[in-house]
Amino acid sequence: MKALSIITGVCTLLLGAYGFCVPLRIFLSLGWILGALYLFNGLTLVIGAFQKKKETWQGVLGGLVALFGLIMLCNLWLRFLNDMMMAYFAGLSVLACGVCILVAGINTWKTSKGMAVLNILCGVLGILGGIFAFLHPIMTMISVGYIICFNVMVQGIGMIAWGIAYKKNETPAE
């Protein structure tokens, strides 16, 4: 188990490092992943409907979800549209968080001026980041690709560290 964890960690770390060379391709892979998830979830709903025998609505829903996943996997333009929408949703979430932080900063002005200034500054930066994401979705995709790669590399390092520290009678949850 120790060697397997270290080997998997090294492969994960190398995958993350490779992703830093092609961050846009990493982001555009999310359409494939989402299509596969829709297909798998749809099939799971259909199987569940057959097991319950009275849940025809679940079977119909599962069939539609699986069909959508299959179409998404086979249709390049639908995957690209999905990826573009994810870039805009990322921008929208950054913008919404920026507004909330800005409002929190304004609300804490009377109790803590230092914290209020920091919140207002972070809120304005979040709003500007959200606006930038809307104006430059390709840059947003590249940035999210880098974030994904960084997280993959961190997981790889964690797997290597766990493999090095692994003791025979220990499980990962302990």
Image (cartoon, helix red, strand yellow):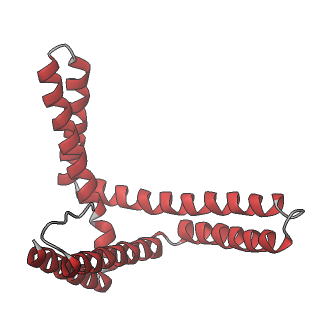
User: For the C terminus, which image quadrant?
Assistant: bottom left
Residue at the farthest top position: 54
Question: For this rendering, which residue is in front, 133 or 62?
Answer: 62
Please provide percent x and percent y for residue 18.
24, 84
Q: Looking at the picture, tell me which residue is in the foreground, 101 or 56.
A: 101
Residue 48 coordinates in the image, percent (x, y): 17, 28
Q: Residue at x 30, y 53 (%)?
A: 78
Drawn side of residue 170 relative to residue 102, left or right: left
The quadrant where residue 51 appears: top left
Q: Quadrant of residue 109?
A: bottom right
- From the viewer's perspective, is residue 170 above or below residue 121? above
Query: Horizontal placement of 41 versus 109: left or right?
Result: left
Q: Residue at x 59, y 66 (%)?
A: 130
Instruction: Count the labels in the image.
Output: 0
Residue 144: % across, % down? 42, 71
* Residue in the image at 26% along x and 65% along y: 29
- Residue 159: image location, x then y, percent: 23, 75
In the rendered view, would you say 147 is above or below 62? below
| Quadrant location, the N terminus | bottom left
Q: Residue furthest right?
A: 110
| Left/right of residue 138 with respect to residue 61 in the rendered view | right
Question: At 53% from the left edge and 63% from the top edge, which residue is drawn?
Answer: 91
In this view, 160 is above or below 120: below
Q: Is residue 61 left or right of residue 144?
A: left
